[in-house]
């Protein structure tokens, strides 16, 4: 069920990245536009933190440096979404509408992988670049508590968060097989994503449930951030891993159902 | 399966379920709750075989089921009934080994990526098809040569003209040296020179590699230049499978008789001999039912002062038009899989 040809797909991904870089070099202005945009976003986020912590010492139990880590994670995962997931999935929806998905399906490679990595907007990596110093600062301020084990847990939660967002987005996009026009769902997702800038624990219960279970923003931002600050529980960690694995499998299954519907095999 | 048939299809059928949308807002609201659907028989139990190295023309009007058949053969669609094998594979199982050996070119759709240079799309296909580097270089060089791609390779697709784009599309589709080609309207919208160029290329590729080609085209010139054999479908049913030259014998109930007269018609009403197609300066073209050809030419020669007379099959375009106009049921436009979304 899972593509086993790992090396091949890594090489394929590398080729897409290279082509993505070459293609985007033509639009060098995009680099500066993204740079400015990301810098503004970051300023707003940090400004928000400053405002909040000028009134209080903790927010829903989170200290300033912990929230700084959260912002780092928010930008890191958000950058990856904007670099790979969103452009690829947008292109996929265009392909369904224009019928050019047929070309993807006649290729001798896994269609889900091809679709998921097919477009890389390399300048969006600026968000990731910005995230790194933010995260580093947060880690330094948090002190020496971060050992090897904590780093590993953090990496695992980051990976799981990324996979959860990817799987979720893939399932939304797969709906294009039935409804053709589903771009608006993406817009909704991106606005829900904004809520991930704050720990989900500060929101009222109903919104927290939405951000955790309906749109799994919490797992991509709050959970990795709480791993950094050492507040993550074992059950949360295991739950996150389980959810990532489950969503990955379910989204793949759903993708296959979509393809079967597209080719008229399910009728 | 026959010994050397590359494509073999048997009683292949495809029925689409199409959403029916009625005019008006109320009807549209109602369709949100309960959709009316209608079954469209796009392909109706057709059978044929194609041998290795053959170039076969696949003809039919819009909505006849050509594209649907090609999509089934290239693994994009599951048939509703019947079976098909290509190179020994069942196409819709999408076996990787099968996909590596076939290609699909659609004249109306692009696989080249819009914003990046053509050569980069080639590069992506090299990675996807796992073409070894030396073989890839060789292939690109060869295709560049045959199709004159040299000045195009570094340009982004969006800067190419329609004809240039089509040449690059075809090259991109052939980098992995497929042995079965499904070409759906490969020359559509191109000017005559470019059409001829592409035709010549298809012949060359076929000769060099011995590839099997199944091609649809609305341009009879393509078919006449490339295909000895044609398969005609109409309303999803197979109407004819055989030599292109046999098509007129089989379907055209008419012959075209061209007469040159010494002193004009000499007062005789020409319409009594047959349907008058053209008349100018003593040259007359008549359409005459096939069965009467002998007697009418006899009468023409006896009753008029004829200086020259030729009997011909009508142009292939007219034959095809005639075949397609015969059907009593109206054409539907279900050539593509989905109903229009707008």
Image (cartoon, coloured by chain):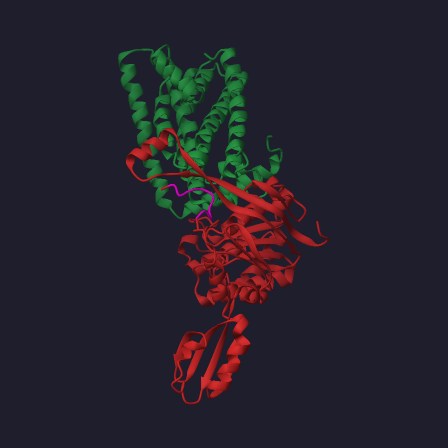
Chain colours: A green, B red
Assign the magenta stretch its main secondary structure. loop
Q: For this view, does A14 lie left or right of residue B266?
A: right
What percent of the width, then of the height, locates residue B114? 43, 49
What percent of the width, then of the height, locates residue A149? 54, 16
Camera-side residue of A51 and B104: B104
Q: Is residue A2 above or below residue B78?
A: above
Q: Is residue A202 visible?
A: yes
Position of the N terminus of chain A by quadrant: top right
Camera-side residue of B135 and B230: B230
Residue A217 inside the magenta-drawn segment: no
**Residue in view at x 26 percent, y 12 percent:** A55
Camera-side residue of B185 and B202: B185
Q: Is residue B44 above or below residue B308?
A: above
What percent of the width, then of the height, locates residue B56? 59, 59
**Residue in view at x 48 percent, y 65 percent:** B317
Q: For this view, does B240 lie left or right of residue A34?
A: right
Q: Is residue B130 visible?
A: no
Q: Is residue B202 above or below residue B37?
A: below
Which residue sits furthest right?
B3
**Residue in view at x 66 percent, y 56 percent:** B51
What percent of the width, then of the height, locates residue B249? 57, 67
Q: In this picture, which residue range is highlighted in magenta?
A: B333-341
């Amino acid at each position: 069920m899972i593509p086993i040809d790992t090396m091949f797909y890594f090489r394929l991904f590398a080729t897409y990245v290279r082509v993505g870089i070459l293609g985007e070099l033509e639009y060098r202005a995009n680099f500066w536009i993204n740079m400015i945009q990301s810098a503004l976003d970051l300023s707003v986020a940090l400004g928000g933190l400053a405002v909040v912590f000028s009134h209080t010492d903790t927010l829903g139990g989170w200290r300033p440096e912990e929230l700084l880590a959260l912002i780092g994670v928010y930008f890191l995962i958000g950058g990856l979404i904007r670099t790979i997931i969103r452009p690829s999935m947008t292109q996929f929806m265009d392909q369904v509408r224009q019928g050019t998905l047929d070309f993807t399906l006649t290729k001798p490679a896994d269609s889900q992988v091809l679709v998921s990595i097919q477009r890389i907007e390399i300048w969006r990596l600026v968000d990731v670049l910005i995230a790194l110093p933010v995260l580093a600062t947060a880690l330094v301020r948090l002190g020496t508590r971060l050992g090897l084990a904590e780093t590993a847990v953090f990496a695992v939660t980051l990976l799981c968060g990324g996979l959860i967002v990817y799987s979720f987005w893939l399932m939304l996009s797969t709906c294009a097989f039935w409804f053709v026009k589903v771009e608006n769902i993406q817009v909704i997702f991106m606005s829900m994503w904004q809520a991930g800038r704050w720990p989900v624990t500060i929101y009222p219960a109903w919104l927290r449930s939405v951000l955790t279970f309906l749109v799994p923003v919490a797992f991509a931002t709050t959970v990795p951030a709480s791993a950094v600050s050492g507040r993550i529980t074992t059950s949360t960690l295991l739950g996150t891993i389980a959810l990532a694995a489950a969503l990955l499998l379910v989204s793949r299954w759903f993708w296959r159902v979509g393809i079967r519907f597209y080719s008229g095999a399910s009728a | 399966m026959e010994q050397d048939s590359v494509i073999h299809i048997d009683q292949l059928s495809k029925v689409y379920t199409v959403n029916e949308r009625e005019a008006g807002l109320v009807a549209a609201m109602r369709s949100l709750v309960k959709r009316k659907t209608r079954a469209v028989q796009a392909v109706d139990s057709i059978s044929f075989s194609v041998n290795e190295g053959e170039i076969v023309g696949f003809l039919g009007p819009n909505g006849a089921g050509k594209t649907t058949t090609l999509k089934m053969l290239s693994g994009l669609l599951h048939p509703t009934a019947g079976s098909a094998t290509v190179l020994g594979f069942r196409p819709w199982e999408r076996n990787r080994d099968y996909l590596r050996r076939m290609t699909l070119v659609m004249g109306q759709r692009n696989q080249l990526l819009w914003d990046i240079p053509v050569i980069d799309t080639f590069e992506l296909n090299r990675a996807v098809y796992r073409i070894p580097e030396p073989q890839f270089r060789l292939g690109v060089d060869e295709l560049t040569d045959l199709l004159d791609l040299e000045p195009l390779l570094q340009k982004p697709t969006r800067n190419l003209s329609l004809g240039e784009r089509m040449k690059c599309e075809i090259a991109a589709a052939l980098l992995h040296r497929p042995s079965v080609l499904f070409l759906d309207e490969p020359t559509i919208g191109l000017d005559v020179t470019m059409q001829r160029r592409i035709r010549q290329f298809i012949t060359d590729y076929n000769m060099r590699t011995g590839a099997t080609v199944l091609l649809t085209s609305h341009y009879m010139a393509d078919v006449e230049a490339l295909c000895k054999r044609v398969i005609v479908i109409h309303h999803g049913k197979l109407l004819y499978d055989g030599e292109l030259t046999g098509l007129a014998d089989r379907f055209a109930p008419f012959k075209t008789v061209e007469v040159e007269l010494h002193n004009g018609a000499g007062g005789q009403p020409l319409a009594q001999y047959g349907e008058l197609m053209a008349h100018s300066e003593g040259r007359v073209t008549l359409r005459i039912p096939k069965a009467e050809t002998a007697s009418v030419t006899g009468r023409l020669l006896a009753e008029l002062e004829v200086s020259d007379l030729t009997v011909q099959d009508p142009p292939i375009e007219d034959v095809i038009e005639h075949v397609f106009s015969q059907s009593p049921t109206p054409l539907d436009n279900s050539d593509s899989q989905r109903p229009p979304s707008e």
